[in-house]
Image (cartoon, grey):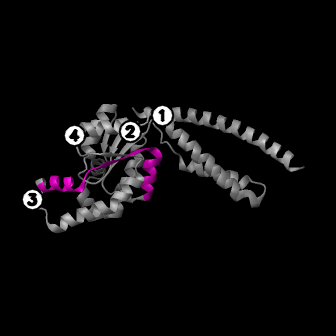
Amino acid sequence: MDIKEAREKIDGIDTQLVALFEERLSLIEVIGKYKDEHHLPLIDETRDREIIVGHKESCKDVQLSPYVESYMKQVVSISNEFLKEHMHKHIFLIGMPGAGKTTVGKMLAKELRRDFYDLDQTIQDKVGKSVQNIFIYDGKDAFSEYEYETIKELIHNKPAVIATGGGTVTSEKTVNLMRNNGLVVFVNRDVNHILDDLDLEIRPLVKESIEYIFNVYEERYPLYEQVAHIKIGNEGSITDAVQEIIEALPNTEK
């Protein structure tokens, strides 16, 4: 077989692959509609792993199995992106404490006719302790696990608006859970404005508290930007912030 014949065969195989991938995406759309109707999570990580591992293990040439694995990872990844575009998704609001996530979230949920959940409040109701007491008696890691498990439960509900805690983004598995099952919106507010509001509630703010808030803001800001699909500013009215989010949403979410 010469190079011309080999290329012609490859072209024929590629044509078949494209046709089969189109069929795969059509079936993914059917699955998306079913998941929408039955309020199922967007991504099934266990199923994805089974697909990738199964095809890797069925590869007849051991030397080619790593390439088969890489290929199937790309197929699954692209299929999941397609799925996300054809399903209604949860909207997760992230940002600093005092950024206005709960206030914005409630109005956004009303505009979109969705349920609203404040993650901290939901955890408190579930555990029977305040967030402060969970940190004191159970520890930070336990609270982070409560966040993950609570979000895992909430994503089985119909698409909602969920305002998260300021530190939710510090857990990689929770971030992946949010990004795989919804749109993550960074509600950003200038730290000085946050401090001004805190100063009205807790007079006077001690120097150590001010430094701590600035340090947390500087530490988390790049993380908020990295995690978010959408970033909006909350420096004006709540109505403006909500409208900015709505305008940035994909059409399927409006």
Which quarter of the rendering shows the C terminus? Answer: top left
Rendered image: mark on residue 203: 3
Q: Earlier in the sequence, mark 3 or mark 1?
A: 1
Distance, label 1 to label 2, CA atoms, is: 21 Å
Distance, label 1 to label 4, CA atoms, is: 33 Å
**Occupied quadrant, residue 242:** top left
Distance, label 4 to label 3, CA atoms, is: 25 Å
* Magenta residue span: 172-199
Q: Secondary structure at mark 4?
A: loop
> Given the current orientation, which residue lies at the most extreme front position?
4
182 vs 130: above or below? above
Q: Earlier in the sequence, mark 1 or mark 2?
A: 1
Depth-wise, is mark 4 or mark 3 nearer the camera? 4
Q: Residue at x 84, y 47 (%)?
A: 6
Image spot of residue 102 (x, y percent): 26, 44
Q: Is residue 183 magenta?
A: yes
